[in-house]
Structures are given as C-alpha cells and as structure tokens.
Image (cartoon, rainbow, N blue to C red):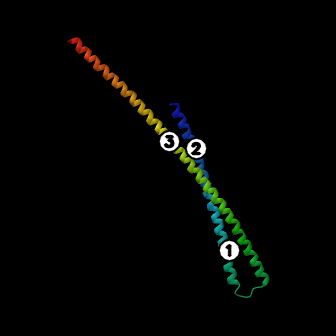
Amino acid sequence: MTAHKSILLAIDLASAQRDQAQSRLQQARQADAFAHAQMQQLIDYLQETEQRWLNGARTSVAPEMLRHHYQFVARLIQAIGLQEGVLKGSQQRLDLAHQELLGIELRLASFKQLLATRRASLAQRQQRSEQKQMDEFATLLVQRQRQLQAENI
C-alpha cells in the first residue's frame, strides 16, 4: 500500500506541475497575442502613414518634408524589424511552454497508468488468494464429508 501512496503522491505533484505549466502556457499565449497585436498596429500605422502621405503628396512637397517622411518610414520599418524579433522570441517561449506541458502530461499519464496497473495486480493477487482459500475450504469440506461418510459406514 505504501507503493500506492508514493504513486499517489507523485500523481499529486505531477498534477500541480501540470497546472503550473498550463498557467505558464496561458501566459505565453497572452504574451504572443500581445506581440502579434503590436506588430499589426505597427503595420497598420505604416500603411496609414503611407496612404496619408500619398494623398497629401499629390500637391507639391518640399524636399525637407520628403526627407522627414522617409526618415519616419525608415524608423517604422526598423520598429517592425525589431517586433519581428520579439515575435520569434514569443513563439519560441510559446513552443517551449507547450512542450513542457506535454512532457508533464505524459509523465502524469504514466503515473496514472502505473497506479492502475498496480491496483489491477493487487486485485488479481487478492482474487487468487481468495480463490485459493475457497479451494482449500472446499477441499476440507469434501474431506470432512468423506470422513463422515466413512464413519457412517
């Protein structure tokens, strides 16, 4: 029974680890969604800026304004490049959290399977013991009946 207790303890610990891993995975998903939203905001802002510039540039534009626009767009493109790095890191953390959760769930499932196997083995041993006792009792009963019949003869 101590083996069962140790397996039950391992199951409890693995369950707690799984819950923590699920929490970390959820946090990683939220961080990834936030990073994607930031990337989309940057892209949308770049597109809006370009559209406004095109609409306003139909009239004559001073060279200084054109230079400032190109610098601003270059900074936006640089920010988008940096955000791509953030997205890659976010995706890696998400993948790692997912792999960690899968590993813990696999370990938990193996503990549960081990417990089920041990319980089945114990039940089988108990059943065999009970069957052996029943067989011995039946044998004694038959011997006693034969003995009584032999005495009555």
Within 10 Å of the Cα at label 1, are there few (<14), some (14-19), or many (20+) other Cα atoms? some
Residue 126 at x, y percent in the picture = 41, 30
Closer to us: 150 or 83 = 150
Give the tally of numbered discs: 3
Tell me the crowding category of disc 2: few under 14, some 14 to 19, or many 20 or more residues within 10 angstroms, Cα based.
few
Q: Which mark is residue 112?
A: 3
Quarter of the figure with residue 136: top left
In primary-sequence order, the first of circles 2 and 1 is: 2
Hey, what amino acid is under mark 2?
Ala
Q: Can you see residue 31?
A: no
| Residue type at tag 3 | Lys
Helix, strand or loop under label 3: helix
Q: CA distance from mark 2 to mark 3?
A: 14 Å
Is residue 119 positioned above or below 65 on the image?
above
Q: Which mark is residue 16?
A: 2
Specify the label residue 129 is tagged with.
Answer: none
Q: Which mark is residue 46?
A: 1
Position in image of residue 74 (x %, y %)? 73, 74
Which is closer to the viewer, label 2 or label 3?
Answer: 3
